[in-house]
Every structure is written in C-alpha cells, then in structure tokens.
Image (tube, helix red, strand yellow):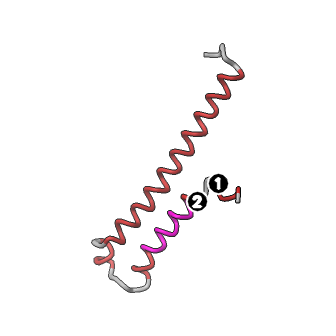
Amino acid sequence: MNWFNGKKTYIISVLMALTSLTHFMTGESTLLEFVGSDQMVNFFEALGLSTLRVGIQRNQEEATHEIVKQVHYPHAG
C-alpha cells in the first residue's frame, strides 16, 4: 500500500472532476445549465484540491532540502 502515498489526493480530485464532467458529457445538462450548476463548482473544487496538493508537495520538498542542507553544512548559512 506504499504506492498510495502522495497519490490519494490526486485520485480523489480526478474522481471529483470526472463525476462533474459526466453530468455534462452524458447530456444530462446543457452547457449553460452545467456552468450555472453545483457540478461546475465541484469541478473547480477538484482543480483547486489538486493545485493545493502540488503546492504542499513542493513546499515539503524544499523544506526537506533545507533541513538536510543545515544538518550536513551547518556553517553554510
């Protein structure tokens, strides 16, 4: 189950986006109905969730790099 680490949020985000787009693609709603509906909000929430996860991951990598640098080269500044 280690291969799930760091991927669960992306999986949820993709499922949220697919669920939202399915309502439009199946003809259940027109484009105008889709844009004004909760499904559009869910779609943007899915995009925001994945964007947030990318930002957190990059921030963690930078922090880890900085900690390792400070441990190995404490006088480097």
Q: Secondary structure at mark 1?
A: loop
Residue toward you, 32 or 23: 23
Residue 5 counted in the magenta span: no
Q: Is residue 16 above or below residue 75?
A: below
Q: Is residue 60 above or below residue 37?
A: above
Neighbor class of circle 2 (other Cα within 10 Å; few <14, some 14-19, many 20+) is few
Disc 1 residue type?
A: Asn
Q: Is residue 9 above or below residue 76?
A: below
Q: Residue at x 47, y 68 (%)?
A: 16
Q: Secondary structure at mark 2?
A: helix
Neighbor class of circle 1 (other Cα within 10 Å; few <14, some 14-19, many 20+) is few
> In this rendering, would 7 be left or right of 38?
right
Percent of width and height locating residue 33: 29, 78
Q: Which residue sits furthest top?
A: 75
Question: Which residue position holds label 1?
Answer: 5
- Residues tagged 2 and 1 counted as in contact (Cβ below 8 A): yes
Disc 2 residue type?
A: Lys
Q: Residue at x 55, y 60 (%)?
A: 10
Residue 19 counted in the magenta span: yes
Tell me the quarter of the picture where residue 59 sits: top right
Question: Which residue position holds label 2?
Answer: 8
The residues colored magenta run 10-20
Residue toward you, 9 or 34: 9
Q: Residue at x 30, y 73 (%)?
A: 37
Percent of width and height locating residue 19: 46, 74
Percent of width and height locating residue 76: 65, 16
